[in-house]
Image (spheres, coloured by chain):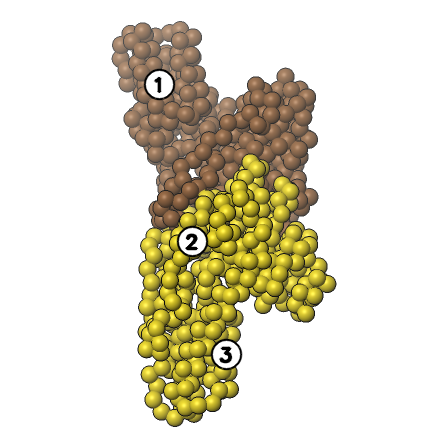
Chain colours: A yellow, B brown
Amino acid sequence: MTPTISGTMPPRTIEWVGDLGGCAKLIDQTKLPGELTFLEIQDAPSMFEAILHLSVRGAPAIGIAGAMGAVLGVRDFSGECDAFLAKLDEVCDYLASSRPTAVNLQWGLDRMRRVARASGGDVSALKATLLAEADLIRDEDEAMCRAIGEHGEYLIGDGCGVLTHCNAGSLATSWFGTALAPMYVAHKKGRKFKVYADETRPLLQGSRLTAWELGQAGIDVTILCDNMAASLMKSGRVDLVITGADRIAANGDAANKIGTYGVALLAAAHGIPMYVAAPSSTFDLSLGDGDEIPIEERSADEIRRGFGLLTAPADAECYSPAFDITPAGLIRGLITERGVVEAPTHEKIAALLG
Amino acid sequence: MTPTISGTMPPRTIEWVGDLGGCAKLIDQTKLPGELTFLEIQDAPSMFEAILHLSVRGAPAIGIAGAMGAVLGVRDFSGECDAFLAKLDEVCDYLASSRPTAVNLQWGLDRMRRVARASGGDVSALKATLLAEADLIRDEDEAMCRAIGEHGEYLIGDGCGVLTHCNAGSLATSWFGTALAPMYVAHKKGRKFKVYADETRPLLQGSRLTAWELGQAGIDVTILCDNMAASLMKSGRVDLVITGADRIAANGDAANKIGTYGVALLAAAHGIPMYVAAPSSTFDLSLGDGDEIPIEERSADEIRRGFGLLTAPADAECYSPAFDITPAGLIRGLITERGVVEAPTHEKIAALLG
């Protein structure tokens, strides 16, 4: 993977540079939006730190980081195959403990363990296989994001105003993102449009990350506080809403960052179509509808002390769900790497995934 | 005015303590929500600073602060009546320049000038008249707020969940507030209910001020980020919304802090009644509807650097209106000191104010 940076895209979030003696190079997201710095990660403990301290975040990006961390953890190993596989397990267990609840991290590491066990050859060949697999995980993610962008870009014509919430962007994936992918593809095709990025309290992924990465690509982006979206829609500047999703039930109900459901209601009230962009792996057909999706409650201090400052009484009660559920009836279409499902229903989703 | 603090109320926001040799005592709102400290203001320059640096804020409270500042500026004057009135003009011009766009500040100062000119007596009598007038301005404000509370308290029954936005509270007035007045009155009557306070980006008046003052009174209050209101309403915990208003047009369209319109739409989508509480002086019958209400655009840095930290690209475009307009059709009732106007129309409002 050549580390080129296109003038119409933000830099790649994470990639492997060079051969087995190279390194994992990733954007240090803890420095955004102030400065763009890259970490060149040479060993597993450094990758552990990068994941733990959120230098890399977003489910797909963390999965890739884990896989590359596994390569880093075993590349200097010398010994027999059995000992190599035991070492790989140890490294994977170690990396998985950096963010124990990140499903994609576990998924990426499990894939590395499986491919090592399934492949023949000596330790040197195993190392090469693992590096190729980590690269493949990255390339598959990018291809999936690009496909979401290709399927969704028709929505964004010249002069269009698009509102998004949180960061379902390039920074959460290898490149292109999910909700932002149609915007990058439309931008590459030369279309002129405006993006409105909700700042997305409490963690401000919209103002810190979405506005930054779209700006890097030269896309016209404007930040607003979450409570300004209704006023903006009323003014006629929003033609379309696109958000990501964390989990989609069999009937099309979609869990996403807190505030998405409110944006969907406001869009409906103003006759603005709302689309949700996500890979097909986001669908969980074991869940009949959104009521079955568990909602994590976040720490009150993200609201009370979100910026290092005390912005509320120190012991104030807070309501702080991490996600909300947008019912399928408010979603005009689901944009996936397999195509767009308009007016999603149980049957259409089953057909897409079938 | 006795500086008592009731166990079921926050402390008074501003009051005069003692006789003409006394002082203006006010809550230093720049220290909230971290600590409760009072400023005892002894001269006009200190009041100028208190207004300038937002130790006192909120239109009614600033009007009272200006009037008390005028007393402080002339109480040590010795000389003839004409020179006294000239000195009063000078002090009033000076205080008015602390926040030139604050209509209520100008209003309070003009009232002080008028009463001095209209009253007879020597300089000593004039000083007493001015102190009495400043006290009267404060007492009238409190009576008006209490009346709003008395008219609106029937809405808040036991077990009720009330959501509010921004701070139309005691801290913005002499005491009791406007949107919060029905809550204080219901609380004094022993009713048990829960208040949900939107934090209200960008300046966080909800988390910094509303949550603080309700907590001081022993009212059960929970803070949420603005984008969590839809999820909270969906959960069934909100029975009622009450907000303040900055300006109300002849047809009942109401301008209030940015985000109020969004809350009104979300309430409508969940079948939750929305009330707007404001004194009758908030109505501007020269404006046919909300489209005629001018909307101030705030500095982008309130969004980009709102917490002292850079939380967005430093040069990012921002959309930051200070207010939005809630159309009368979304307002179940207007709560004023003269009574409640249900389902407001031009005719009902004219009858109320007539």
Q: CA distance from mark 3 to mark 2?
A: 35 Å
| Circle 1 residue | B92
Same subunit, labels 3 and 2: the answer reads: yes
Task: Please name the residue shown 57% across and 40% down the image.
Answer: A233
What type is the residue that disc 3 sits on? Asp
**SS for dot 1:** helix
- Quarter assignment of residue A7: bottom left
Q: CA distance from mark 3 to mark 1?
A: 75 Å
Which image quadrant: the N terminus of chain B? top left
Please report, as a chain letter, where disc 3 is located. Answer: A
Task: Please name the residue shown 65% across and 63% down the image.
Answer: A249
| Circle 2 residue | A8
Q: CA distance from mark 1 to mark 2?
A: 57 Å
Image x and y of residue B125, in percent = 37, 11
**SS for dot 3:** helix
What type is the residue that disc 2 sits on? Thr
> Does residue A39 appear anywhere in the picture?
yes
Choose the circle earlier in sequence order: 3 or 2.
Answer: 2
Please report, as a chain letter, where disc 2 is located. Answer: A
Residue lying farthest left?
A: B78
Image x and y of residue A257, in percent = 54, 56
| Circle 3 residue | A110
**SS for dot 2:** loop
Above/below status of A121 relative to A159: below
> Crowdedness of circle 3 by 10 Å Cα count: few (<14), some, many (20+)?
some
Q: Which mark is residue A18?
A: none
